[in-house]
Image: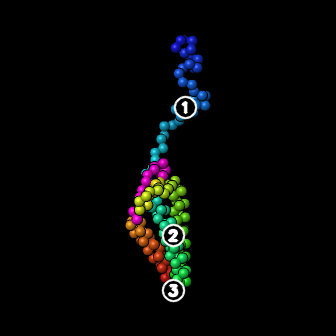
Amino acid sequence: MSKKLAGNGRWESSRMMLPEHREALLERRNAPTEIKRAEVPTKEELEMIRDSVLLPIMLTMVEKNGKELQLSTNTLRKLYLAATQILMNRLHAELARLRRELRERQIKVFEDDREDSDLHFRYICRGYEDKFSVIRDVARATISVKLGQHIQAIVGEMQK
């Protein structure tokens, strides 16, 4: 390049750059080098993610059983329906609390489509993205334990 063209800034590069792009590049160079690291979820957060997936399944199961009870001719049908409704209210409240907590912690859970019998999901936790699967037998066992805990809590409240 000749001496006349060296200092005017127009011919300093072989590429053309818009003034907006140049400003953005300079801002990026002058910005602090603080890089935000993606945070891996804690054990508690992973359990919250798992529960956020299993609670809707639990609600569906309890609702289905409630509909079957409505068609039943059992003499204690009204008692069972009332208990079912209390259980559904507790599950709804827990699911709402859990979703609010996940939102506050910047965690999103998405269902992943697969052809096999397991449940597949992916989640994004403050920039960290991963996938997980729940085997149906493990899901059944976990749901059974959680339903047992809720039923035990309801019975404990009734005994007071």
Q: Nearer the viewer, residue 48 or 66?
A: 66
- Identify which residue is drawn at 57% across, 20% down: 9
Above or below, comparing residue 136 to residue 32 in the picture:
below
> What element does badge 3 sit on?
loop
Q: Is residue 41 above or below residue 94?
A: above
Distance from disc 2 to disc 3, alpha carbons, whole Å, reads 22 Å
Which residue is labeled 1 in the image?
A: 25
Q: Residues within 10 Å of mark 3 (few under 14, many from 20)?
A: few
Q: CA distance from mark 1 to mark 3?
A: 74 Å
Query: Which comes sooner in the sequence, label 1 or label 2?
Result: 1
Residue 93 painted magenta: no
Which residue does the numbered mark 2 point to in the structure image?
A: 60
- Residue 128 lies in magenta, yes or no? yes
Total numbered labels placed on residues in the image: 3
Query: To which residue does mark 3 refer?
Result: 74
Q: Is residue 158 above or below residue 127?
A: below
Can the viewer see residue 76? no
